[in-house]
Image: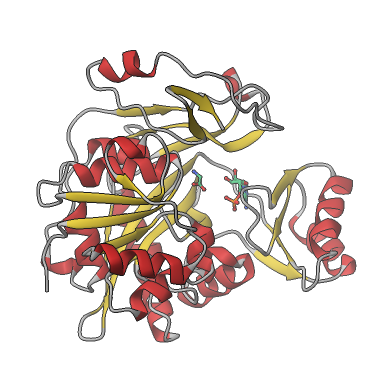
Amino acid sequence: MTTAPRSVLVIGTGGREHALALALAQDPAVTAVHAAPGNPGMAEVATVHDVDPMSGDAVADLAASLDVDLVVVGPEAPLVAGVADAVRERGIVVFGPSRAAARLEGSKAFSKAVMAAAGVPTAGSRTCETAAQVEAALDAFGAPYVVKDDALAAGKGVVVTRDRAEALAHAAHCMSREGGRVVVEEFLDGPEVSVFALCSFSAADGPTAYALQPAQDFKRILDGGRGPNTGGMGSYSPLTWAQDDLAEAVLAQVVRPTLAEMADRGTPFVGCLYVGLALTASGPRVIEFNVRFGDPDIQPVLALLGSPLGGLLMAAAQGRLGDVPAPVFRDGAAVSVVLASAGYPESSSKGDVIDGVALAAEQEGVDVIHAGTARDGDRLVTA
Ligand code: AMP
Ligand code: GLY
């Protein structure tokens, strides 16, 4: 077995994938980074390939033709669609969960069931299929109401509100789709943090995990958090105000029991388990699981990572994470600030010229990370 990958293919187009490509390019063992479909920023550190990230066959064909040592699948949609399975079936090493394990993000009801079985601290919840069940659940938990679409909804599935009519309307909207269900849950009060766990599984040793340094992201646009929710406007790490053993506590209370439960079900989890937590008065409680790195919350974490990323992801993907040292982080702090196009998040403006990027990138300690950009001749524009 290879210990560190020489060549890696990153799947995705976003800031998360650009940050992964940058960190992989800085791994001394990695001599070639490829990306599909990538973005103009990634094209500066990787060879980009115009391949559909949602097609398992197309991704596996590309990985085979490039003869890469490792494929890293960035976003949740291809994982939930089974792209990692298609790559793994060709005998190619892939960092990212199977379709079955990606249900931890793909179905809120499934992830709540796994948390309950594993004894993971989380919000009390009920899965509902009818308006009467929703009414009863709203009564049971009280305001503020939390109503979540069971299915993957690209950040638009959750409504947190004191307005009962709004909660009911969101539930009705989600349940109006074929097989639509919602999860109604208890409101968790406390600062939200992100803990990313690199997860590995082997039949001989069972699950193994390492936690990365915790981060925090901010979803509301405008100064002072006055605007609507977005995909994320910025993030930072480390959390100097949080308990020192937060990552260890999350590994012990959340990640290891979840990985054991997934292994018991015959669907071991391999990849990044993103634990979104509320630090409540009664301790950390899980708000949600994602099955991939956070965007933009992984960016500052990767900027501070002192260990070679390729070796870590490869070891996790091969079921031998315990054979490599736990990740270490540099002293200091990193902050990620998102610059969005006019109108975001309601709409976005395409084709606006972006300048100043080269100047920003020249600054000491600054990385410019792209998401939603395109080349128009020699100009960089919003897309
Ligand atoms: P999710 O898609 O599950 O991450 O939810 C999106 C956002 O809704 C989270 O980042 C939280 O800010 C909020 N949220 C979700 N569940 C809860 C909860 N049980 N209590 C309070 N806020 C929540
Ligand atoms: N940072 C939020 C997310 O990636 O879902």
Does 378 sit above or below residue 23? above
Residue located 58% across and 68% down the image? 112
Q: Nearer the viewer, residue 299 or 282?
A: 299
Residue located 66% across and 63% down the image? 151
Quarter of the image that includes the N terminus: bottom left
Q: Nearer the viewer, residue 357 or 351?
A: 351
Report if residue 121 is visible in the image. no
Q: Nearer the viewer, residue 82 or 146?
A: 82
Does 174 sit above or below residue 361? below
Does 351 sit above or below residue 231? above
Residue 61 at x, y percent in the picture:
37, 69
Q: Nearer the viewer, residue 111 or 239?
A: 111
Q: Which quadrant would residue 131 be assigned to in this image?
A: bottom right
Residue located 48% across and 51% down the image? 276
The answer to whether residue 81 is left or right of residue 124 is left
Residue 7 at x, y percent in the picture:
20, 57
The answer to whether residue 262 is left or right of residue 244 is right
Quarter of the image that includes the C terminus: top right
Extreme residue in the front direction? 377
The answer to whether residue 256 is left or right of residue 162 is left
Report if residue 210 is visible in the image. yes
Residue 90 at x, y percent in the picture:
33, 78
Q: Which quadrant would residue 204 be assigned to in this image?
A: bottom left
Residue 123 at x, y percent in the picture:
59, 59
Residue located 85% across and 64% down the image? 176
